Image (spheres, rainbow, N blue to C red):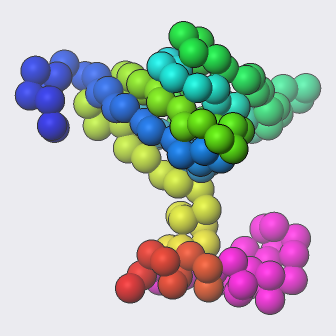
Amino acid sequence: MQIAGLNTLGISIARIDYAPLGQNPPHTHPRATEILTVLEGILYVGFVTSNQPAPNRNKFLSKMLNKGDVFVFPVGLIHFQFNPNPHQPAVAIAALSSQNPGAITIANAVFGSDPPISDDVLAKAFQVEKNTIDYLQAQFWENNHN
């Protein structure tokens, strides 16, 4: 929407600046494949395949990227980028195959929803105690629902 020449072409582009040890946390784009190109620094990136039949069920694929490297995140799959360098920032360009790719940050969606998802449901899903879920929800609730 900010680059008029791209509007209605079915694509998006974004520059992402990563602080030292910064990340773009696990998220998904429900309507787009993403192609990431590292312009400066290094990035550790990865995604998890979908719930397909074994042996490829929920397979984690990752790679350390250097300046000039390119990585593709398939549409709808959970993925992330992390700058492992504690001293230098990193910069990347992300191109997406939709002008409205959507973005769902997994932790925010699961633990910071409004109203919150029942801690009974999440405790059973993650196989942890309810107090663990309550703690996680409190972290996201304070930051996202002021």
Q: Is residue 137 above or below residue 54?
A: below
Q: Tell me where residue 111 appears, x and y as whole percent.
A: 61, 72
By secondary structure, the bulk of the magenta-drawn segment is best described as helix
Q: Is residue 114 left or right of residue 90?
A: left
Is 77 rendered above or below residue 121?
Answer: above
Residue that appears at 60% across and 67% down: 110
Image x and y of residue 52, in percent: 76, 31
Q: Which residue, as the protein is rendered here, is positioned at the far right?
A: 55
Q: Quadrant of residue 94?
A: top left
At 10% from the left and 21% from the top, the residue drawn is 5
Q: Which residues are magenta?
A: 114-137
Please provide percent x and percent y for residue 19.
Answer: 54, 45
Q: Is residue 76 magenta?
A: no
Residue in the image at 14% along x and 29% along y: 3
- Residue 124, visible in the rendered structure: yes
Query: Is 6 left or right of 106, judged from the image as shown?
Result: left
- Quarter location, residue 10: top left
Q: Position of residue 39 (x, y in %)?
A: 48, 19
Q: Is residue 125 magenta?
A: yes
Q: Which quadrant of the rendered structure holds the C terminus?
A: bottom left
Residue 123 sits above or below residue 29 on the image? below
* Residue 36 in view: no
